[in-house]
Amino acid sequence: MGALIHDVRNQINGMVLELTDLRERWPDPRVTAETVPLMKQAMEMADRLRGVRERLDPPAPRLQPLSLLEAWPQIAPQARLVAGLSENDTIEIDPVQIKLAVAELITNAVEASNGATLPQGRVEPGQLVLIVENPVNEAPQQIEQWGKISGFTTKRRHLGLGCSYVHAVARAHGGRCEWHYDDKAKLVRAELRLPLAQTA
């Protein structure tokens, strides 16, 4: 949690400084041509703060029962499904949250190594597994932090909250996110595991 707290504190401290500067430049409460840009800036900052909060504590997922054939184009339209798809398999997910979580994994992978494969997926017994791989040169013990610390990140831009959103979405869906290091291929493999709906 230390990395997550550090990232959030930095973001909030930066916004506090911006808000302080904004207040000093906006002493007149009346709406004038000069204050309109300041109002827009204040609203943008409010949206940024709201975004930080939602990344730490996403809203409850709006679960939809979908067949995998229906769900797949909604959550990973460019990914290839490598094994196990059956038209009888169904899953209860919030497609918007899962698509955002996959996008987070891809962004993290690209910024960590300047390269990422397209996501893949496979069906294992009782699970849908969404996979993002990226080449790395770091030591394996550093890679392990990706899965153990929810806020760990190598990202220099984007949300600055590591993979906390992915972890939160996975937990809300009854799943989990794991990272594995392939020393032979020099790849990190992120796996977002989601439970399939139980059939009667």
Image (spheres, grey):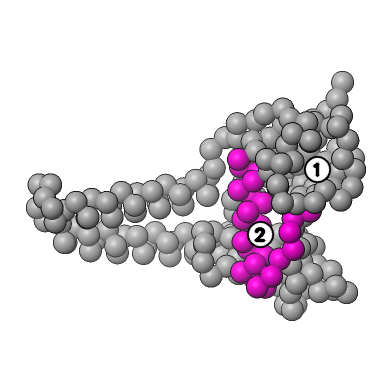
Kindly indicate the quadrant of the structure image that contains residue 97.
Answer: top right
**Left or right of 17 on screen, residue 99:** right
- Which portion, as a residue range, is magenta? 96-120
Q: Amino acid at mark 2?
A: Ile
Tag 2 and tag 1, C-beta contact below 8 Å: no
Residue found 14% across the figure and 56% down from its top: 34
Kindly indicate the quadrant of the structure image that contains residue 198.
Answer: top right
Residue found 49% across the figure and 45% down from its top: 54
Q: Is residue 70 above or below residue 123?
A: above
Q: Amino acid at mark 1?
A: Leu
Residue 128 disc label: 1
Dominant SS type (magenta): helix
Residue 106 disc label: 2
In the image shown, does 9 or 38 lie closer to the viewer? 38
**Element type at marker 2?**
helix
On the image, the x and y values in percent for residue 149 come to 65, 60
On the image, the x and y values in percent for residue 112 come to 64, 70
Kindly indicate the quadrant of the structure image that contains residue 116.
Answer: bottom right
Q: Residue furthest top?
A: 200
